[in-house]
Image (spheres, helix red, strand yellow):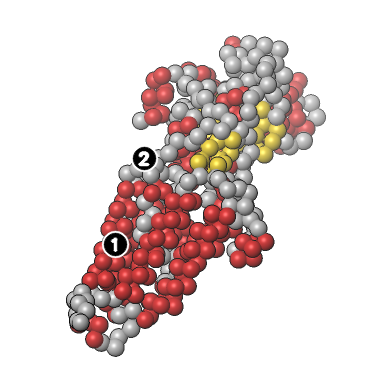
Amino acid sequence: MNIMTAPAFIVSINQSHFNLNTSNVAGFFGGDEAIAAMTTVHLYRGRRWLGWYNSPGSYTVAKKFGQLAKSRFWDGLFPGPNLTPAEVFGLDGKPGPRYWGVFSGTDMTTGHLAYLMVQKTKDVQAEAEVKGRETTPLSVTIVDLGDGDLKHLDQAPMMSIHHALLAAIPITISLATCTISAVTGDWLAFALIMIGVISSGISCLVMGSAQLEFASVKEAAKGVPPADGVLLMRTDVVILRGAEKDIDPITKGKFVLKMNGGPEFRRIGLCSLLLLAQFLLQLLLIPQATTFGQIMFISSLAASWAYNSFLSSLEQEKIQINILLKALRHPPMLKIALKNRASQAVFSCLVLSDNVRRPSNSDFKPKEVLQCFVPNETRVWNTWRDKVVEELEKNEEDRLFDLSSSDLPGFTDHEKQLLKSLFQDACNAYRGYQSHIHKIKFISSPSSNEKQLC
């Protein structure tokens, strides 16, 4: 009895003795791009369902995310620090600037969300500049957070699916090369491409099942004063304005990944083991495929690498910033450029001492604000701070920011010259504040919101 077999197309290149030696790229090529692509799986809607392509860099991805699995076995197979899921996926771990609450007295180091907010303010264009003596370009950015309503364990909004839909290209090419390999009779190339498709798809599906949420203070204490405060950097300052419940998510909050199976995360370990098996099988067996089959294999890797490179080029940090701003309902921001530290200190003090926002009988102390910006303990700076505070506590029409001869006993000529320059800086800051006071007080108006969202 004759057994009928399916005919296979004969490809002439398979008759040659040429070998591509594709084992060199089976698991190592494109590892960084594959990791960057995997870290977007929680950021784009539908991204977890679109990982069915023969992705390169399986060894690098397995070693990176296998560290999530926690047990003696998994720690031996995938050694490394035991990080949280958010840290492994690059959603936490960046240190933020120092935060000081001018009414509450809170003084603390912030975390990842404050870092993202500061990065956003760097991209905001200054709407005005305070004139004066120039030393170092500085800025003050005011952020009104009163319109947000971000609560503890609120689910983070996801980005649009349109970038993720481009995965149709590597998926189609991987399945096409797999089919062509089978039609030409190279079942080994067919199997190795299919293994890559299955392991990548399952890993993306399992790792993407986690839910991205915000973690913050569960409930602010009743009766707390406004949480207006400053995020202090080397040259720039961000003034946060709002209630305690509005500012806590920035200063005390973070991203968390709510992932099932913790704290051992065995499913992540099994996915990493599957990726490791893919790497070993492709490394050892792809040289045994025909030359045409190896070309098909490389073609699927190249298409997948191009898509991973595209995802990595989107800059995960900017995606996180957009998610944070979307959750905060795009808070309005106003940036003012200044030219020296003294002007920056006085300008910030004027913004924070606004009587409209400042609670009656508050613990606001202008001298502490000035000392926070300029901590120098010399008699020149002490005299300057005392005199500026004295002027700030006067009615607006009586403020002069000037020195009389009675204020300068015992100072040398150089010290008198420095004091006059510093008081001129304070005067310039006050004039700049008066010039832009309408913008500063009402940046959260509807018109300003529309401007910020354009």
State whether residue 431 appears in this view: yes
Q: Which mark is residue 175?
A: 1
Of residue 265 and residue 353, the one placed in the foreground of this image is: 265
Residue 20, given in percent of the width and then of the height, sits at 34, 80
Residue drawn at (48%, 42%) of the image: 320
Compared across the picture, whether 184 is left or right of 199 comes to: left
143 lies left or right of 418: left
Q: Residue furthest bottom?
A: 17
**Is disc 2 placed on a helix, strand or loop?**
loop
Residue on which disc 2 sits: 160
Q: Position of residue 62 (x, y in %)?
A: 52, 62
Residue 240's spot in the image, x, y percent? 57, 28
Rendering quarter of residue 378:
top right
Q: How many residues crowd mark 1 within 10 Å: few (<14), some (14–19), many (20+)? A: some
Label 1, label 2: how far apart the Cα atoms are: 25 Å
350 lies left or right of 307 = right
